[in-house]
């Protein structure tokens, strides 16, 4: 059992029969009132984020999760298919809410981590923070337009569109932060 003051960012617990993860935590002690734990929590089944205050009389059950390496296979019509690492016949689909924005930056055969509950349900897919992707299409940079550090839109090999500096060209390999969807650096210039 967890007490309200044992919560911290990343803690996974069960409350009212539903698994949650703590995204933000703040311990508040107000005058003449009992202390509370102010949190933002994410429902691990639906992906919905809510704010909730926990009091000292509430007991929470910490849940155990298993992290399993899986391989991203493909996306088709909103369905995202994976298989267990080393077992390509064991295929399964995961909803986009459990993957997040990072699905836009996953290439085929990328290894990611599936977070499973004790009963085998997948509650989240953890992706690498950064991905190296090839620029498929971007307009040419304009000469003399670099004083302000301008950017332009670039379509990556996964179909995602990100803003890149003007010096990035078709065929370049760029590193993208999968959490924010922002350009980080150019890894390799096109040959």
Image (tube, grey):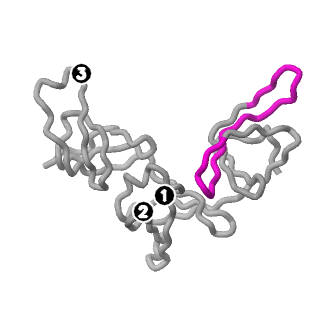
Of the two numbered discs 3 and 1 on the same chain, state the one appearing first in sequence: 1
* Element at label 1: helix
Badge count = 3
Q: CA distance from mark 3 to mark 1?
A: 37 Å
Disc 2 versus disc 3: nearer the observer: 2
Element type at marker 2? loop
Q: Which residue is mark 2?
A: 78
Out of 75 and 164, give the one closest to the viewer: 75
Q: Quadrant of residue 8?
A: top right
Left or right: residue 34 compared with residue 162: right
Foreground pick, 125 / 16: 16
Q: Nearer the viewer, residue 135 or 43?
A: 43
Determine which residue is flagged by label 3: 148
Marks 2 and 3, how far apart at CA: 38 Å
Image coords of residue 7 (percent x, y): 74, 41
Please give the name of the residue rendered at 84% of the width and 48% of the height, measured from the top-left corner: 59
- Residue drawn at x 63%, y 47% as measured from the top left: 42
Instruction: Identify whether 86 is placed above or below 20.
Output: below
Q: Are marks 3 and 1 in contact (CB under 8 Å)?
A: no
Q: Residue at x 76, y 37 (%)?
A: 53
- Determine contact: label 1, label 2, CB under 8 Å: yes
Residue farthest along the bottom direction in this orientation? 89
Residue 180, image x and y in percent? 43, 40
Alpha carbons under labels 1 and 2: distance apart: 8 Å
The residue tagged 1 is: 96
Counting from the top left corner in percent of width and height, residue 177 is at 40, 43
Left or right position of 39 against 74: right
């Amino acid at each position: 059992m967890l007490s309200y003051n044992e919560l911290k960012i990343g803690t996974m617990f069960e409350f009212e029969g539903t698994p949650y993860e703590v995204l933000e935590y703040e311990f508040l002690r107000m005058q003449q009132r009992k202390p509370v734990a102010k949190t933002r929590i994410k429902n691990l089944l639906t992906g919905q984020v809510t704010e909730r205050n926990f009091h000292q009389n509430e007991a929470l059950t910490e849940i155990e999760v298993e992290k399993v390496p899986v391989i991203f296979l493909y996306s088709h019509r909103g369905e995202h298919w994976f298989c267990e690492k080393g077992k390509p016949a064991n295929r399964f689909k995961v909803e986009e809410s459990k993957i997040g924005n990072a699905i836009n930056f996953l290439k085929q055969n990328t290894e990611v981590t599936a977070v499973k509950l004790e009963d085998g349900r997948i509650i989240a897919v953890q992706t690498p923070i950064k991905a190296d992707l090839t620029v498929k299409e971007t307009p040419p940079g304009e000469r003399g337009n670099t004083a302000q550090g301008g950017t332009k839109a670039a379509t990556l090999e996964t179909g995602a569109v990100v803003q890149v500096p003007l010096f990035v060209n078709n065929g370049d390999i760029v590193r993208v932060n999968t959490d924010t969807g922002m350009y980080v650096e150019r890894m390799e210039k096109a040959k």
